[in-house]
């Protein structure tokens, strides 16, 4: 084999500059992503309690985790949360997007207002909603004055999950709405004009034109919503504490409490890997079921 | 790129990595490092105590700082232990966490240190230390004991024909029937909250009161599925079924508006109310933890048993100055003048059983009747069960006992049986 010419083996000045600049990110990723990731993988197949040396235990943590009824309940709670959250998130986001289309003046200000809830502190808004949803709070006092009844927002298993979904939806609907609004702007007006000529009504135009043309943005919102549901911590932790009867306990709460309250980091590491896998599989499934390639012929 | 530039880049990267390297685990042996609870009152006490110790030159000098926490002390202590930056001594440790630290072999058995028995005798802790002893080992020493008692709005009691705070379930029922308006105002706040810690301030307090201080846990078995547990659970159930209490009082402090006329409160609330709700505090009458009449009589006429929210101090095993640290601890805790200073600064009763008989404390309690009521219960207040699994035990107590009683999904007997059964199964699985 003929050796490469000398000048081919040496990196160019641009390549060295490029590598140097990229190395900052590579070092960052190695320290804050790769190292924790491998440590997590190692923990999941060992027994470790913070101060001793990890002892290899094979699949014992996985078996223990998938047999842990409270962990399984927390995964089921994600499904229950999504059942409330998805309609609220999509319905609210579509309303925001369609509403923004009709705003003539101050559109940027209105959009900023929707984003404010998204950048608000989860802790602060959870404390506010805790008071609002209290059985003796202002919302229940109002309902009691009108109907003579009180709604057990945080002490009934189903209503407690609905309350959490409402709070999280309030936080994210504006953000999702802006994503959908950006999609609406890309739909050519000529398509709607042609549809009107064919006597297509508003619902037909929504179902046959708007929603299919928004598929990419809707999928993006769906993926974000699934990620939010698996990452849920602050709101249930502060508003319901996971109750009543573990009906709002989430995988993130389980992981936190197992690692830092029960002092079982190996068990928690296994949980986090399983949660990652389940969320990934759910996203793949959602994309397979709902993602469409839409092109203008 | 020049070789010099590459060298600079390499040096810069190395410096960055060096900054991320773990701190040295080298322990100092010429100073005692102390962490104290992050609040002004306790910090003020330790500032004086440490200054006096250092001025006396009785041993190694002490440096102290508040626990560097933004969240819970437990998380911070744990992080410090993992990073190797823990001090020699740390206060603000609750007994369950101390047991966890002992199980992880991170704290010293204080009972094995020379001078421990003398300290217990000098501080009159003979009746208190058994509650912090597990298998003959004492992994934390209580600094203060805060019994839970029930605050009542005296004006509301009087307006409804009661001249003193209720002592029995029947008195609470009768008062609630007169005062309560379902959905509008309630006899008393029965459930303290949703967190696992809140069980200390409702069911466990009620259980201790009605059982005369019997334990609710023995090793790997829950013990509260008994007559006392049933009475406490039946009381909670009846209050909810009659609409004399609400599932939560998150929206406001119920005693201020009279939304509830009574609620379980600790001595730390005296300072809070004095600062925020002074007018309400002036109308508060403190009563004992309620129990059935027979149980109150069974206590021999003395104070009713209740729960004690105590915090203790530990010495970490990594310390190279264990003996010297304990000498400092024995000096602080055994000194009556410093105990009085603690009381004045924090309003929390030192964990000693002679508070009301020792003339040194008499003047303080004469001028602080609310705090005195708490001091009267220090000897009869019981700490939480010593268990590494405190959180799981009390989470089960929440989900299987208190919440079903709140919603009416289970009878008191069924809820008790489920809670105890689940606790035993959890403890067996952990074992």
Image (tube, grey):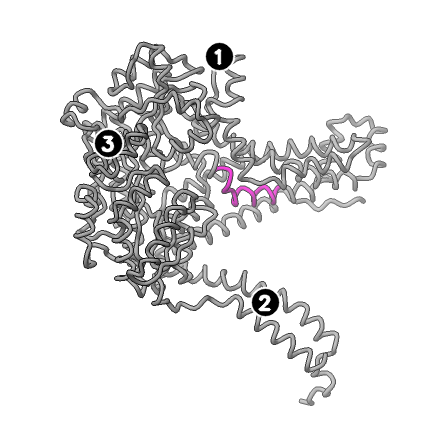
Using the image as rendered, state which of residue A145 and residue B285 is in the foreground. Answer: B285
Residue at label 2? Answer: A27
Write down the region rendered in magenta. Answer: A222-236
Residue at label 3? Answer: B376
Dots 1 and 3: beta carbons under 8 Å? no
- Mark 3 belongs to which subunit? B
* Position of residue A72 measured from the top left corner of the image (x, y, whole percent): 41, 43
Residue at label 1? Answer: A148
Q: Is residue A135 above or below residue A235?
A: above
* Position of residue B215 measured from the top left corner of the image (x, y, whole percent): 20, 37
Neighbourhood count class around disc 2 (C-alpha, 10 Å): few under 14, some 14–19, many 20 upward = some
Q: CA distance from mark 1 to mark 2?
A: 62 Å
Dots 1 and 2: beta carbons under 8 Å? no
Q: Residue at x 28, y 32 (%)?
A: B365
Judged left or right of residue B145, residue A50 is right
Q: Residue at x 42, y 18 (%)?
A: B258
Q: Quadrant of the N terminus of chain A?
A: bottom right
Is residue B216 visible to us here?
no
Considering only order in the chain, which callout, 2 or 1, is on the residue closer to the N terminus? 2
Secondary structure mostly taken by the magenta-highlighted segment of the chain: helix
């Amino acid at each position: 084999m003929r050796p490469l010419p000398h000048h081919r083996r040496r990196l160019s000045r641009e390549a060295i500059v490029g590598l140097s600049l990229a190395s900052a990110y590579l070092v960052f990723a190695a320290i804050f992503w790769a190292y924790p990731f491998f440590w997590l993988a190692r923990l999941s197949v060992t027994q470790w309690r913070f101060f001793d040396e990890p002892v290899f235990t094979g699949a014992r943590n996985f078996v223990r985790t998938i047999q842990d009824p409270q962990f399984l309940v927390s995964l089921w709670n994600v499904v229950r949360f999504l059942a409330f959250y998805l309609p609220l998130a999509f319905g609210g986001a579509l309303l925001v997007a369609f509403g923004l289309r009709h705003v003539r003046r101050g559109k940027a200000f209105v959009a900023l207002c929707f984003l404010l809830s998204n950048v608000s502190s989860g802790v602060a808004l959870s404390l506010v909603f805790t008071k609002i949803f209290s059985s003796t709070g202002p919302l229940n006092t109002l309902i009691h004055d009108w109907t003579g009844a009180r709604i057990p927002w945080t002490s009934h298993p189903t209503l407690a999950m609905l309350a959490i979904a409402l709070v999280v939806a309030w936080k994210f609907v504006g953000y999702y709405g802006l994503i959908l609004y950006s999609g609406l702007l890309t739909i050519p007006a000529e398509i709607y004009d042609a549809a009107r000529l064919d006597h297509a009504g508003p619902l037909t135009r929504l179902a046959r034109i708007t929603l299919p043309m928004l598929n990419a943005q809707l999928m993006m919102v769906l993926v974000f919503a699934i990620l939010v549901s698996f990452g849920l911590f602050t709101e249930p932790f502060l508003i319901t504490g996971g109750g009543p009867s573990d009906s709002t306990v989430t995988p993130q709460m389980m992981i936190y409490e197992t690692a830092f309250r029960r002092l079982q980091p190996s068990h928690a590491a296994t949980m986090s890997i399983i949660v990652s896998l389940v969320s990934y599989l759910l996203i793949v499934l959602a994309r397979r079921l709902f993602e469409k390639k839409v092109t203008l012929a | 790129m020049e070789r010099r530039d590459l060298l600079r880049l390499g040096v810069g990267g190395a410096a960055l990595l060096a900054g991320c390297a773990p701190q040295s685990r080298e322990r100092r042996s010429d100073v005692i490092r102390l962490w104290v609870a992050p609040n002004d009152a306790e910090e003020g006490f330790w500032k004086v105590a440490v200054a006096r110790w250092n001025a006396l030159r009785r041993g190694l000098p002490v440096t102290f700082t508040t626990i560097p926490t933004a969240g819970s002390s437990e998380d911070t202590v744990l992080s410090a232990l993992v990073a190797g930056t823990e001090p020699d001594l740390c206060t603000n440790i609750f007994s369950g966490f101390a047991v966890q630290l002992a199980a992880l072999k991170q704290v010293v058995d204080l009972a094995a240190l020379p001078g421990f028995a003398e300290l217990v005798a000098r501080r009159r802790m003979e009746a208190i230390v058994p509650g912090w002893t597990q298998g003959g080992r004492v992994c934390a020493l209580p600094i203060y004991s805060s019994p839970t008692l029930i605050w009542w709005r005296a004006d509301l009691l009087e307006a409804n024909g009661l001249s003193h705070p209720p002592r029995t379930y029947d008195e609470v029922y009768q008062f609630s029937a007169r005062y309560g308006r379902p959905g509008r105002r309630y006899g008393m706040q029965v459930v303290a909250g949703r967190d696992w810690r809140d069980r200390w301030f409702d069911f466990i307090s009620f259980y201790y009161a009605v059982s005369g201080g019997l334990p609710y846990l023995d090793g790997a078995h829950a013990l509260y599925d008994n007559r006392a547990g049933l009475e406490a659970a039946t009381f909670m159930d009846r209050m909810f079924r009659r609409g004399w209490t609400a599932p939560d009082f998150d929206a406001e402090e119920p005693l201020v508006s009279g939304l509830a006329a009574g609620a379980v409160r600790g001595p730390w609330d005296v300072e809070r109310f004095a600062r925020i709700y002074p007018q309400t505090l002036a109308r508060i009458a403190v009563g004992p933890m309620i129990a059935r009449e027979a149980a109150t009589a069974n206590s021999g006429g003395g104070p009713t048993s209740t729960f004690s929210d105590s915090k203790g101090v530990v010495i970490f095993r990594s310390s190279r100055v264990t003996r010297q640290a304990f000498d400092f601890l024995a000096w602080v805790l055994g000194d009556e003048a410093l105990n009085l200073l603690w009381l004045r600064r924090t309003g929390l009763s030192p964990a000693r059983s002679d508070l009301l008989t020792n003339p040194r404390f008499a003047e303080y309690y004469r001028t602080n009747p609310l705090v005195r009521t708490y001091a009267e219960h220090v000897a009869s207040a019981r700490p939480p069960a010593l268990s590494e699994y405190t959180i799981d035990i009390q989470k089960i107590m929440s989900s299987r006992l208190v919440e079903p009683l709140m919603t009416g999904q289970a009878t008191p007997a069924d809820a008790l049986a489920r809670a105890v059964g689940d606790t035993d199964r959890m403890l067996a699985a952990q074992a």
